[in-house]
Amino acid sequence: MSSTAAAACEARIVALEGQSVLPMSVEPTVERLAHVPRAPRRREGALVREAQRGSAEALEELFRRHWRRAHRAAFLVVHDSSAAEDIAQESFLAAIRALDRFDRRRPFGPWLHRITVNRAIDFARARALRGERALSDVSDPTSPDRAEISDQLLSGLAELSPEQRAVLVLRYLLDYTPGEIGEILGLPRGTVNSRLRRGLDRLRPLVEADRS
Amino acid sequence: MKRDGDLRQRLGELPLPDEAGAEERAWDVIRAAYAERTPSRTAHRTRRLALAVAVGVAALAVGLSPAGAKVGDLVREVVEIGQEDARPALRSLPAAGELLVESDSGPWVVREDGSKRLLGDYEQATWSPRGLFIAVTDGRELVAVDPLGEVRWTVTAPARVSDPRWAPTGFRIAYRSGDDLRVVAGDGTGDHPVARDVAPVAPMWLSSRDAKLAAGAVPVAHVLAYVDSSGTVRVIDADTGATIGPDPTQRERLLALETGSALSPDGERTARVVRRSDRSALILEEAGQRRVIFSAPGRLIAPTWSPDGRWLLVGWPQADQWLFIRSDEPRRVVPFDDISDQFDPGGTGEAGFPRVAGWVLPQR
């Protein structure tokens, strides 16, 4: 490599390393989500405290409150019911293992959702890399119209990357703001917004077709 | 917006297969795990105690000989720490920075809060010095990605790519391709061979201080050491390929790096894993002094320094653990358990033990 070429390369690299790349937050997300107003937070704090002290009833109430949305979120990201069940289950188990260290002043939901959605993204990525195919195993024989619509929606979601699906799920299923989603996934808000836009562009026609 | 409300409603109403059954199955598992919280800790302690006893017996055997007395003392110190419970999940790193981890499923970036991101279906990986990018290998390709896995550039080499090493300046990456040693600029341009018939040993970039020592009066920006097929360590100018000289002083360091050693960020200390029959010891060398800071049955692998030089991370495949050890305070060991599973999501549980390929403090 000539010295001129080398200097040109270095100049490009300086520009490359100096440019604004997607920042990855290193602060504990749970701490920064502490301000997120979530429904019955105080009561939930009491449930966490009781669960920390050994109350299975308190744990069950926490589980019943959060299982369905966590399970659904995992399913919508991985599109595999068995995997979604495993991911949601493992996320709860991880939460239980860390229960003693959990600060009960903080909301339980964002903590759990962060574990669940990130595990789901990693699973979907790993499966894609292994060349496995997702199973479209959603069906509801008692409601054929709804099943058809759901299949269309699922097909639309399936055309998105796991990361895009996760952003949509966090926004429209779990009701997080783009800023909160950025914190959960370690993405800049602009990236979250662009993924939301692209995802909505893909899904809106399916939803509107159903509405009309 | 109404249409967004529709999407929200659809996502919430989407029928999931056997949703109620999944909930009950999960609750059975969660309830059982919760009920076993205390007993499982006891079992964990028992296992840890058994391991500690085994280590202690070995330490006693070492301590019987005068030469082993000091090592024995240190090992016994570690035994006390080994009774602490390992943490079941990597929830946070003890020092600032991010890890690059090579696993069967590909390289991962682990952030300080313990969250992880799989970069893709790649093989080996190396950090850029500022942690902005990662060079990964995939067959004949060398690929630069950012920490979220977005591909920045790809170079296709004539033969299978291995052992990428990003230069401390950030401007060059050296890698092996078949029997060749090649260098490419950090932006993916200027890929060229710099040596033929190299041994299957990773190249090593010399620090600016060592480069000055090797190159003498002539300033050379990128000095690379490698081992040729005859076993001779050669030192070259990575931009021109010009030989600076066979350098016997680099041989020990270069080969040591291949056999489980790590230079501290300040270049003053070396952490080295030494194997003796069925045991391994992590030894710290500084100013001609050596001390054992950890010893264990089986293998210890890939010692890695934290960016601040205060912690050493070492893998312990036999225990499926990573151990974070304070280099200046060996009594402080922070173990993490079930490492293989944590880097094999959705796998069969038969994944190999993940290897740490670097720990940097990103300057984003």
Image: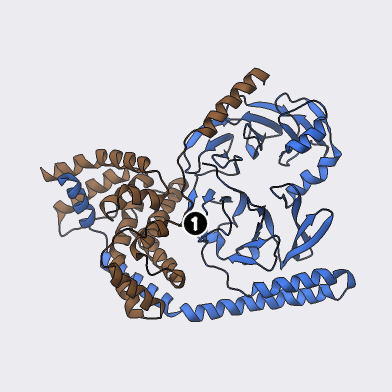
Left or right: where B292 falls relative to B24: right
The residue shown at (81%, 41%) is B250
Looking at the picture, how far across and down is residue B22, in whole percent?
31, 67
Question: Is residue A90 shown above or below A52?
Answer: above
Quadrant position of residue B228: top right
Q: Callout 1: helix, strand or loop?
A: loop
Q: Circle 1 sits on which residue?
A: B113
Mark 1 is surrounded, within 10 Å at the Cα level, by few (under 14), some (14 to 19) or many (20 or more) other residues, namely many
Question: Is residue B63 shown above or below B214?
Answer: below
Q: Nearer the viewer, residue A29 or B178?
A: A29
In the rendered structure, the colour chosen for chain B is blue
Question: Is residue B116 shown above or below A67?
Answer: above
Quadrant position of residue B299: bottom right
The residue shown at (59%, 78%) is B45
Looking at the picture, how far across and down is residue B88, in whole percent?
52, 67
Q: Residue furthest left?
A: A212
- Asked whether the viewer can see residue A2, the reply is no
The residue shown at (24%, 42%) is A203
Q: Amino acid at mark 1?
A: Asp
Q: Which chain is brown?
A: A
Looking at the picture, how far across and down is residue B171, in whole percent?
62, 31
Instruction: Please identify the quadrant where the N terminus of chain B is shown.
Output: top left
How is colour applied across the structure in the image? Answer: by chain
Looking at the picture, how far across and down is residue B111, in whole percent?
51, 52
